Image (cartoon, grey):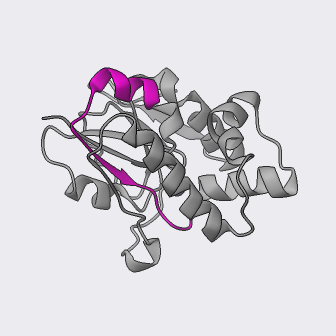
Amino acid sequence: MVKVIISCMDYRLTEEIQKRADNNTLIFRNAGANVNEFIDRLKEIKPDEIIYLPHTDCAAMKLVFNVIKNNDKVNEEVENKLVKQFRKVKFETLEELERINASINEEMLKQITNNVRTELIDVSKLKWPNRITKVYFYLPNMRAKEVGAYILQSSSLSDVSADIYIAKEKLGFKEIYDCSSSNCKQI
Ligand SMILES: [Zn+2]
């Protein structure tokens, strides 16, 4: 029985994600809970259960909104992995885009297993930790300890290169750490 949680790198979500995980749960996190980026990994893993956790007030969805509606610029990788899938859908507000994001990704996950549960986390209902403008990369079986930091999780650092670009170039974060081996190393 393999359980997978997919969510966003947002600093407010770490506790919410980890309290839904048991010891063997695999966690995947990137900018926007963007399933497209993880789909090949998920096909390899063949999970029996997926919990999908997008959230409100998402910086990645604001980025997508601004690229499509206001012509903001991103690199080709972010365009292809994140933005492109929303160019063919109609939306007027950020809230609409967040709901569309949840449903597009849920549909994609249902190609992997029928056992998908989606919960759009309303961050206005959470107690926010102090925000730390650092990004930590962990493997899916690891548990991040840095509450309040931004957390990326996948099987390989190269899976999340688009998200590292977003963190550096769009969110202005200078400190990114690879914690996939025993010590975290700044990259
Ligand atoms: Zn987010």
Res. 17 image quadrant: bottom left
Residue 94 forms part of the magenta stretch: no
Q: Compared to 65, does 95 lie above or below?
A: below
Q: Compared to 161, does 152 lie above or below?
A: below
Residue toward you, 186 or 181:
181
Q: Is residue 87 visible?
A: yes
User: In the image, what residue occupies the spot 45% across and 31% down?
Assistant: 38
Residue toward you, 51 or 161:
51
**Seen from this angle, which residue lies furthest right?**
71
Q: Compared to 66, does 186 lie above or below?
A: above
User: In the image, what residue occupies the spot 47% across and 56% down?
Assistant: 132
**Seen from this angle, which residue lies furthest bottom?**
125
User: In the image, what residue occupies the spot 52% across and 32% down?
Assistant: 37
Percent across and percent down for residue 131 are 47, 62
- Which image quadrant: the N terminus? top left
Q: Is residue 58 visible?
A: no
Count of marks overlaid on the render: 0
Percent across and percent down for residue 160 are 52, 31
Tell me: 135 left or right of 48: right
Which residues lie in the magenta part? 39-58
Residue 44 forms part of the magenta stretch: yes
Residue toward you, 128 or 122:
122
Percent across and percent down for residue 106 are 44, 49
User: In the image, what residue occupies the spot 69% across and 43% down?
Assistant: 83
Percent across and percent down for residue 134 are 50, 47
Q: Compared to 29, does 70 lie above or below?
A: below
Res. 156 image quadrant: top left
